[in-house]
């Protein structure tokens, strides 16, 4: 047991947290630039360089691996698998499907349209739409590298619960009439599913890495920059006053701040890391991350072109309520997770 714990600790420290990279960047900042990392400027440069390199390395490796697995499940095959599943079981499958699609909320909407027009239950497609930007294997491993196994696992579990619950409620309320008519009128085309060769799967995975990196690199840099500023320049007392545990509205405020932002989960993690380091409650941090990824303003504008206002309002209300509830519950039981 001790050997397993030591092995896991080594993997977590060296492969996920990349402590070797942290020490290398520290050495370069202090010896080449002559800036102690204990001071603001040196600490900011260390935070920015270390987190940026680490996120891009982890993201490239993980997206490649996930995309290789995903190549066995093209949309046509996925539609056939989900087509015969109904009820909460279907919502669970839809939510789990979202975990193997490393998309931001805006990128998930075209798939949502495709699944809905193909006749999949609306609740299943909404479970997918909620979970896809929130939860995936890459985000789980990157979260674990920053916050540890317990918080990363808890984030994945509550993300899936939120996706299943939201999809189930929408399904029970029979909201199909509030989907824009053109979505249901899209002609369904059955495409023959062909198996890819190993070379094609590798090429597909490489292209996915390039595409996703191209899409998120700016948001990652912005997120790391904001994280570095919070970590080294904003006094802890200010952060605690605004969204600390003593503020009963901290979770609501964090969720509200996150909604106007547009970022992939990978861009929010450095900000969350800095807030967590300043003593902000884990529930408040998770509420911020979830609102950015699931309820970003651009994705809601896109979704408004697909569903009518009543269904859009229900979706926003359900997800917002779930995020805030999760935030307060996590803050209440934070000692178990940290």
Image (cartoon, rainbow, N blue to C red):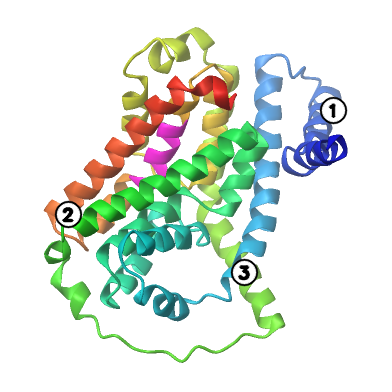
Category of crowding for the residue at label 1, using alpha-carbon neighbours closer than 10 angstroms: few (below 14), some (14–19), many (at least 20): some
Q: Position of residue 3 (x, y in %)?
A: 88, 38
Secondary element type, mark 3: helix
Residues in magenta, as a range: 286-295
The answer to which quarter of the image holds residue 54 is top right
* Residue at numbered disc 3: 69
Secondary element type, mark 2: helix
Precedes in sequence: disc 3 or disc 1: 1
Up the image or down, 336 lies above or below 113; here it is above
Up the image or down, 293 lies above or below 330; here it is below
- Residue 294 belongs to magenta span: yes
Q: Position of residue 174 (x, y in %)?
A: 16, 61
Q: Position of residue 190 (x, y in %)?
A: 37, 89
Secondary element type, mark 1: helix
- Residue 197 visible in this rendered orientation of the protein: yes
**CA separation, marks 2 and 1?**
54 Å
Precedes in sequence: disc 2 or disc 3: 3
Q: Position of residue 62 (x, y in %)?
A: 66, 56
* Residue at numbered disc 1: 27
In the image shown, does 253 or 175 lie closer to the viewer?
175
* Residue at numbered disc 2: 311
In the rendered structure, are the residues bearing label 2 and label 1 in contact, judged by CB atoms less than 8 Å apart?
no
In the image shown, does 144 or 95 lie closer to the viewer?
95
């Amino acid at each position: 047991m001790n050997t397993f714990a030591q092995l896991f600790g080594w993997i977590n420290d060296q492969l996920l947290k990349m402590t070797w990279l942290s020490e290398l960047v520290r050495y370069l900042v202090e010896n080449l630039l002559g800036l102690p990392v204990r001071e603001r400027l040196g600490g900011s440069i260390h935070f920015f360089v270390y987190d940026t390199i680490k996120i891009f390395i982890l993201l490239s490796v993980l997206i490649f691996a996930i995309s290789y697995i995903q190549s066995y499940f093209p949309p046509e095959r996925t539609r056939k698998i989900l087509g015969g599943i109904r009820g909460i079981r279907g919502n669970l499958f839809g939510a789990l499907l979202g975990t193997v699609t490393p998309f931001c909320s805006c990128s998930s909407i075209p798939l949502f349209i495709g699944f809905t027009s193909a006749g999949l239950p609306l609740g299943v497609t909404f479970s997918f739409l909620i979970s896809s930007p929130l939860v995936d294997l890459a985000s789980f491993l990157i979260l674990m590298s920053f916050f540890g196994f317990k918080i990363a696992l808890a984030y994945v579990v509550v993300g899936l619960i939120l996706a299943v619950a939201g999809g189930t409620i929408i399904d029970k309320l029979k909201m199909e009439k509030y989907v824009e008519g053109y979505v249901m009128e899209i002609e369904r085309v059955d495409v023959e599913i062909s198996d890819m060769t190993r070379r094609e799967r590798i090429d597909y995975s490489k292209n996915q890495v390039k595409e996703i990196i191209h899409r998120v690199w700016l948001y990652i840099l912005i997120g790391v920059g904001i994280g570095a500023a919070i970590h080294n320049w904003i006094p802890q007392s200010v952060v605690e006053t605004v969204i600390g545990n003593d503020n009963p509205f901290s979770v609501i405020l964090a969720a509200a701040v996150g909604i106007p932002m547009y970022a992939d989960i990978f861009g929010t993690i450095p900000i969350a890391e800095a807030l967590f380091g300043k003593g902000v409650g884990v529930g408040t941090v998770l509420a911020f991350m979830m609102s950015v990824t699931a309820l970003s303003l651009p994705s809601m504008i896109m979704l408004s072109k697909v569903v009518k206002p009543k269904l859009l309002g229900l979706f926003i209300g359900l997800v917002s309520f779930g995020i805030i509830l999760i935030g307060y519950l996590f803050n209440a039981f934070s000692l178990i997770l940290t």
